[in-house]
Image: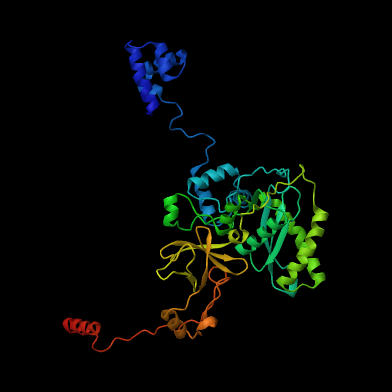
């Protein structure tokens, strides 16, 4: 008996000994008083069996026979292995003469632990999003890797932004690949031409969002939050919001832009005879005003939401790659294979053991800052260990042997000649390992 039926027995026993009334029993059991009288009659005549449902233990007449169920499972794991539920149901009807509904087949297969090879996503309702009402409120940014130069040159990535309100392209730049430097150049161009936008809308590229699989540092664990990416830190400094899309359809405006440019801009580049990324950028800057005048739409609200750049903002120090180092005892910091010597200033002689910020700027310069102030630096002489390492690898010393920082430590790996791999050494005849082997052999023989 179930717990529900056992509780009914206890309540009815109380009614039979006249401790409880029928009205009280009806409330406890959750039925009407007439039903309580029916249960009492069945309990008096049949006992506990009268309270058990009459269909218990009986199979419904429309239940699929066990032989049919076994046949369906055998066919699903054998002859028709790999077919989805709908296709398998059709095959059973066409080839095996078994007319079963798809829910029945699905129920049989799931009961046997067989899942459909292709799960069907539930349909989603999508609707067209309204444009933001004013220019500068939202810029959709993305990169398109395409044969922009056709067979005349390499494949390039066009990094661009499109205004959500007007459909104009305030800035764009050709890059060899989609990278953070390209988005820095794009943002700087937007800032210089228009101002600071309110927000950017992008995909979930690692340029904008740290990977969830990347382990957290000790500082992040103590702070309880992840550090932003290099580009994300620049957006936070400028007060620009970042909205991450969950699907390509969410940023459909810039996706449709790629379809237009991959048709029209490719032709413009062909007519101009562009073959390199520099030539492609020149053609692009000439074409953007023509594109904007042709495809722009009026914003729902006049004016501009772009914010002006405040005088105290140093764009060169914001739109750059930043690395944090602890100054060594000899007032040097290292970035890649480059070592910088910090020079004494008017307000401070030594920066040893201080935490400083190294900036790789877009113009190729490297700047060291401490509490927002730039420290005078020069390239430090190479240490003896570094010189011996260069000599062992066959590299020259001096300026030719030093690797340029910009485009090398984090952006483009420098390929150094590989050292000869060490050859495995062969143990000598008096090696302890050989003596143990000889002793073991003599004991076993």
Q: How is the image coloured?
A: rainbow
Query: Measured from the top left, where is residue 302 in percent x and y?
Result: 77, 43
Residue lying at 44% horizontally and 30% vertically, measured from the top left: 56
Query: Measured from the top left, where is residue 346 in percent x and y?
Result: 49, 64
Q: Is residue 111 left or right of residue 285?
A: left
- In this view of the protein, which residue sits in the foreground, 338 or 135? 338
Q: Is residue 156 left or right of residue 18?
A: right
- In this view of the protein, which residue sits in the foreground, 424 or 222? 222
Quarter the C terminus occupies: bottom left
Q: Is residue 328 left or right of residue 357?
A: left
Q: Would residue 297 be seen by someone viewing this image from the given angle?
A: yes
Quarter the N terminus occupies: top left
Query: Measured from the top left, where is residue 222 in percent x and y?
Result: 42, 51
Residue lying at 36% horizontally and 21% vertically, measured from the top left: 9
Q: Is residue 272 left or right of residue 325?
A: right
Up the image or down, 266 lies above or below 203; here it is below
Up the image or down, 219 lies above or below 344; here it is above
Outermost residue, front direction? 346
- In this view of the protein, which residue sits in the foreground, 149 or 299? 299
The tally of labels here is 0
Up the image or down, 404 lies above or below 220; here it is below
- In this view of the protein, which residue sits in the foreground, 276 or 371? 371
Residue lying at 80% horizontally and 51% vertically, measured from the top left: 296
Q: Would residue 41 be seen by someone viewing this image from the given angle?
A: no
Up the image or down, 413 lies above or below 26; here it is below
Residue 189 sits in quarter: bottom right
Query: Measured from the top left, where is residue 249 in percent x and y?
Result: 67, 50
């Amino acid at each position: 008996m179930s717990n529900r039926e056992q509780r009914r027995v206890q309540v009815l026993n109380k009614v039979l000994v006249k401790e409880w009334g029928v009205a009280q029993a009806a409330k406890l059991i959750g039925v009407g008083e007439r039903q309580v009288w029916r249960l009492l009659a069945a309990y008096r005549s049949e006992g506990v069996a009268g309270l058990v449902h009459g269909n218990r233990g009986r199979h419904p007449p429309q239940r699929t026979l066990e032989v049919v169920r076994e046949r369906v499972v055998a066919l699903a794991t054998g002859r028709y292995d790999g077919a989805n539920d709908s296709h398998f149901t059709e095959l059973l009807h066409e080839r095996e003469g078994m007319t079963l509904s798809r829910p029945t087949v699905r129920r049989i297969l799931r009961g046997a632990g067989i899942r459909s090879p292709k799960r069907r996503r539930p349909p989603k309702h999508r609707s067209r999003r309204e444009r933001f009402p004013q220019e500068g409120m939202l810029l959709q940014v993305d990169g398109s890797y395409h044969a922009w130069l056709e067979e005349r040159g390499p494949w390039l990535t066009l990094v661009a932004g499109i205004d959500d309100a007007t459909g104009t392209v305030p800035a764009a730049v050709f890059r060899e690949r989609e990278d953070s430097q390209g988005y820095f150049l794009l943002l700087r161009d937007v800032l210089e031409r228009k101002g600071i936008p309110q927000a950017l809308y992008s995909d979930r590229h690692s340029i904008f969002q740290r990977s969830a699989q990347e382990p957290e540092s000790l500082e992040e664990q103590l702070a309880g939050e992840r550090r932003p990416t290099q580009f994300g830190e620049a957006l936070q400094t400028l007060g620009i919001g970042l909205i991450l899309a969950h699907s390509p359809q969410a940023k459909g405006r810039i996706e449709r832009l790629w379809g237009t440019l991959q048709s029209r801009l490719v032709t413009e580049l062909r007519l101009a005879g562009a073959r390199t990324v520099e030539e492609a950028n020149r053609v692009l800057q000439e074409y953007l005003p023509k594109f904007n005048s042709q495809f722009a739409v009026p914003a729902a609200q006049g004016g501009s939401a772009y914010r002006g750049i405040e005088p105290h903002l140093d764009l060169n120090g914001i739109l750059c790659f930043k690395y944090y180092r602890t100054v060594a005892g000899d007032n040097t910091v290292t970035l890649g294979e480059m070592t910088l010597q910090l020079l004494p200033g008017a307000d401070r002689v030594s920066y040893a053991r201080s935490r400083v910020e190294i900036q790789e700027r877009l113009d190729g310069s490297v700047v060291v800052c401490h509490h927002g102030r730039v420290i005078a630096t020069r390239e430090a002489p190479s240490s003896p260990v570094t010189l011996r390492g260069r000599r062992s690898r066959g590299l020259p010393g001096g300026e030719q042997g030093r690797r340029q920082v910009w485009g090398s430590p984090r952006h483009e790996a420098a390929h150094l000649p590989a050292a000869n791999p060490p050859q495995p050494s062969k143990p000598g005849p008096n090696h302890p390992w050989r003596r143990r082997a000889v002793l073991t052999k003599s004991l076993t023989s």
